[in-house]
């Protein structure tokens, strides 16, 4: 059984408190940049361009992640407008980060004359390893857990963090742990196939779109209080779209390009 979170604070330095959530996300960003470095270090001009793009993509992704989360849970924020900016308490949606980060990559790839698909391939494993680290922050914040579960791998949740309808239950599905494990497997698969498939632009982002789309679509069935349309949540509809795009990327006809890299 996974014990309940020991608390949200990682360290306190004078009046400044550093949350586990923030610490985990920073570690995820560092890990992502390390992957980018490993994949581009052989070409200094290209590496410099990728890191410049990555800097702005992280900022755009952070903003998009928060906006998407607030929209997805507007049922709560419409009555708590003051909490919209409290990102240290959690609430960064990966789909929002992927949308705004992807738009940023596209704009800057055109500006720097770099293949957009090659950039996406480079960022796919970087984003995945960032997600692996970032999801640990959800554990300390006692969020991203699912419906009640009575099993040896269940997650204990403090009563103050339980949804009102499940206040009588003590253990729940550890969705953050499921996603950490599945994302790590997908990351490993992409890295193992890198040398074999790296010349085919779009393969890594295609695998990511399909793999993470399936992961998120499946795990959302275990969540509660999610905004949606019809029988599916918003995240599931987006995941289905990602899967379709991923299949197209893996099956599309290759074409030549005039881009520098």
Image: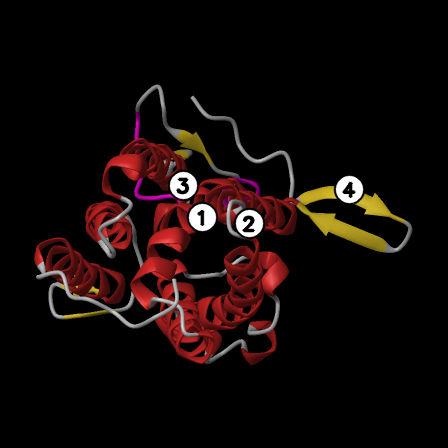
Q: Quadrant of residue 150?
A: top left
Mark 1 Cα-neighbour bin, 10 Å: few <14, some 14–19, many ≥20: many
Disc with the residue nearer the chain's start (2 vs 1) = 2
Q: In the rendered view, does 21 fall on the left or right side of 181?
A: right
* Label 2 sits on residue: 33
Dot 2, crowdedness within 10 Å: few (<14), some or many (≥20)? many
Q: Residue at x 22, y 51 (%)?
A: 200
Q: Mark 4 or 1 closer to N-term?
A: 4
The answer, for residue 197, to whether it is visible in the render is: yes
Tell me if label 2 and label 1 are in contact, CB under 8 Å. yes
User: 30 or 93, which is in the foreground?
Assistant: 30
Residue numbers of the magenta segment: 137-150
Q: Tell me the SS state at disc 4.
A: strand
Q: Position of residue 109 (x, y in %)?
A: 41, 72
Tell me the distance, in whole angstroms, between the alpha carbons under discs 2 and 4: 24 Å
* Residue identifier under label 3: 176
Alpha-carbon span between mark 4 and mark 3: 22 Å
- CA distance separating discs 4 and 1: 27 Å
**Which badge, 4 or 3, comes first in the chain's sequence?**
4
Q: CA distance from mark 2 to mark 1?
A: 7 Å
At 40% from the left edge and 41% from the top edge, which residue is drawn? 176
Packing grade of label 4 (10 A; few <14, some 14-19, many >=20) is: few
Q: 201 or 99, which lies in front?
A: 201
Determine whether the residue tagged by mark 1 lies in a helix, strand or loop. Answer: helix
Do callouts 2 and 3 mark residues in contact (Cβ within 8 Å)?
no
For label 4, the residue is: 11
């Amino acid at each position: 059984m996974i014990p309940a979170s020991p608390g949200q604070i990682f360290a306190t330095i004078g009046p400044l408190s550093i949350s586990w959530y923030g610490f985990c996300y920073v570690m995820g960003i560092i890990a992502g940049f390390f992957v980018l470095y490993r994949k581009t270090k052989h070409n200094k001009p290209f590496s410099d361009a990728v890191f410049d793009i990555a800097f702005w993509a992280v900022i755009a992704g952070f903003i998009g992640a928060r906006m998407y989360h607030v929209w997805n849970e507007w049922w709560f924020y419409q009555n708590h407008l003051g909490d919209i900016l409290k990102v240290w308490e959690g609430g960064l949606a990966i789909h929002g980060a992927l949308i705004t980060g992807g738009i940023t990559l596209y704009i800057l790839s055109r500006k720097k004359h770099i293949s957009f698909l090659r950039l996406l391939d480079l960022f796919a494993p970087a984003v995945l390893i960032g997600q692996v680290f970032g999801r640990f922050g959800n554990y300390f914040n006692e969020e991203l857990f699912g419906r009640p579960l009575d099993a040896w791998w269940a997650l204990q949740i403090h009563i103050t963090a339980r949804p009102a309808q499940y206040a009588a239950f003590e253990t729940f599905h550890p969705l953050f742990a499921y996603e950490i494990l599945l994302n790590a497997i997908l990351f490993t698969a992409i890295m193992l196939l890198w040398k074999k498939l790296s010349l085919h632009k779009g393969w890594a982002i295609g695998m990511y779109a399909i793999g993470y789309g399936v992961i998120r679509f499946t795990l959302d069935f275990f969540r509660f209080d999610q905004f949606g349309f019809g029988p599916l949540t918003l995240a599931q509809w987006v995941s289905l779209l990602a899967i379709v795009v991923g299949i197209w990327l893996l099956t599309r006809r290759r074409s030549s390009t005039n881009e520098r890299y």
